[in-house]
Image: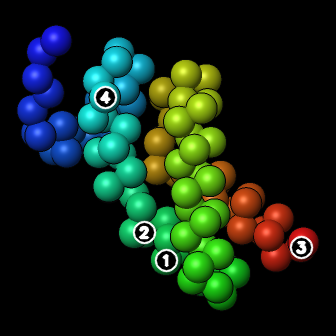
């Protein structure tokens, strides 16, 4: 197995998605690292509960991981995450 360089954090989202789908075990972690804080702040602003926002953001990344193979790679990955996060946060507010 070839070692994956930490330089994966310097790749853009599209390349990280491709690397993840090609089996790079660190690529998805780099995507999480890149988007986690911004998504957490976004969801927290919507629902007003930091602990619950952390749970929802974790759920966003679980869903992204499970569905990434069907993600339209011509689209922006970050925008897709925000769309998923927005839908989960709105559903939480309605519950």
Marker disc for residue 41: 1
Q: Position of residue 14 (x, y in %)?
A: 35, 33
Q: For the residues carrying marks 4 and 1, which lies nearer the camera in this image? A: 4
Q: Which residue is mark 4?
A: 25
Residue 86 picture quarter: bottom right
Point 49% across, 77% down: residue: 41
**Vertical comparison of 10 with 44: above or below:** above
**Vertical comparison of 8 with 56: above or below:** above
Work out whether mark 1 precedes mark 3 in sequence or the reverse, and give the earlier one.
Answer: 1
- Classed neighbour count for the residue bearing mark 3: other residues with Cα under 10 Å, few (<14), some (14–19), many (≥20): few
Marker disc for residue 38: 2
Q: Nearer the viewer, residue 79 or 47?
A: 47
Work out whether mark 3 precedes mark 2 in sequence or the reverse, and give the earlier one.
Answer: 2
Q: Which residue is mark 3?
A: 94
Image-based side of 31 in relation to 65, left or right: left
Work out whether mark 2 precedes mark 4 in sequence or the reverse, and give the earlier one.
Answer: 4
For the residues labelled 1 and 3, say whether their Cβ atoms are less than 8 Å apart. Answer: no
């Amino acid at each position: 197995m070839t070692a994956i360089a930490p330089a994966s954090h310097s790749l853009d989202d599209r390349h990280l998605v491709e690397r993840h789908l090609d089996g790079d075990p660190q690529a998805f972690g780099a995507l999480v690292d890149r988007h986690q804080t911004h998504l957490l702040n976004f969801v927290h602003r919507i629902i007003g509960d930091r602990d619950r926002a952390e749970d929802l953001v974790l759920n966003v990344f679980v869903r992204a991981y499970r569905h990434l193979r069907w993600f339209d790679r011509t689209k922006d990955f970050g925008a897709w995450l925000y769309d998923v996060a927005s839908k989960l946060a709105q559903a939480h507010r309605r519950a």
